Image: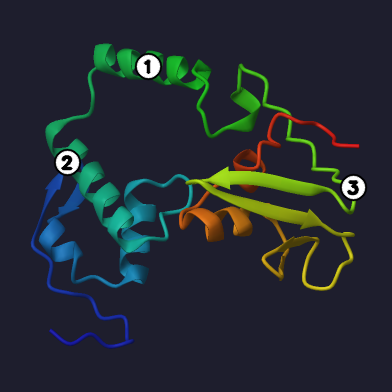
């Protein structure tokens, strides 16, 4: 059925329960967002309706179901409210305010003196990296005549897999090399 921008009232099969006209969910699918919002304000009367069509349809259908079959009994409502209160007190891992364990301190930056030579043996082959000044053209690390911005890129070039550069070269436990 083609839809137009003009707000047309669809043919709706409904029934009245407790002075509320209940619209079938199948008929709600043909209604425009403006009509659904109007229906929401008539039914719910509180807070703004959801902006996402699928959520709006679900909530309207739920309110209609509640009107026809009755809502949640007092005992179930009390149980749900208790569960909500408990859930609010449980810390979540993605909420920084509710963490109970302190965050790990960020790793200190490597402070390598220019001229330092890093040596690592990998699969029987010796690999040497020379540390240059931070402002060195192309990057502060030199390996096989090429310059790199970081040790991780060199570790990946050597191993063919992603590695933490500082860990690969044994620097992850060292705070400062001077």
Mark 2 packing: few (<14 Cα in 10 Å), some, or many (20+)? Answer: some
Mark 3 packing: few (<14 Cα in 10 Å), some, or many (20+)? Answer: some
Q: Is residue 152 above or below residue 106?
A: below
Q: Nearer the viewer, mark 1 or mark 3?
A: 3
Seen from the viewer's position, the closer of residues 163 and 81 is 163
- Per the image, the residue denoted by label 3 is 113
Q: Are marks 1 and 3 in contact (CB under 8 Å)?
A: no
Seen from the viewer's position, the closer of residues 146 and 52 is 146
Mark 1 packing: few (<14 Cα in 10 Å), some, or many (20+)? Answer: few
Instruction: Name which of mark 2 and mark 3 comes first in the sequence.
Output: 2
Q: Is residue 159 left or right of residue 145?
A: left
Residue 65 - label:
2
Q: Is residue 153 above or below residue 31?
A: above
Which residue is drawn at the image coordinates 67% and 20% (left, top)?
Answer: 102
- Per the image, the residue denoted by label 1 is 83
Mark 2 vs mark 1, CA separation in Å: 23 Å
């Amino acid at each position: 059925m083609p839809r137009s921008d003009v707000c047309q009232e669809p043919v709706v099969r409904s029934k009245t329960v407790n002075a509320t006209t209940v619209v079938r969910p199948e008929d709600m699918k043909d209604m425009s967002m403006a009509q659904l919002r109007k229906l929401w304000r008539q039914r719910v009367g509180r807070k703004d309706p959801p902006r996402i069509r699928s959520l709006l349809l679900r909530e309207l259908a739920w309110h209609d179901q509640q009107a026809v079959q009755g809502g949640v009994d007092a005992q179930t409502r009390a149980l749900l409210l208790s569960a909500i209160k408990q859930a609010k007190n449980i810390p979540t891992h993605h909420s920084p305010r509710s963490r109970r364990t302190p965050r790990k301190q960020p790793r200190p930056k490597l402070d390598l003196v220019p001229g330092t030579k890093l040596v690592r043996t990998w699969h029987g082959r010796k690999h040497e990296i020379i540390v240059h000044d931070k402002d060195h053209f192309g990057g502060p690390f030199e390996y096989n005549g090429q310059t790199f911005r970081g040790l991780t890129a060199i570790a990946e070039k050597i191993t063919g897999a992603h590695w933490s550069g500082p860990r690969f070269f044994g620097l992850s436990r060292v705070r400062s090399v001077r």
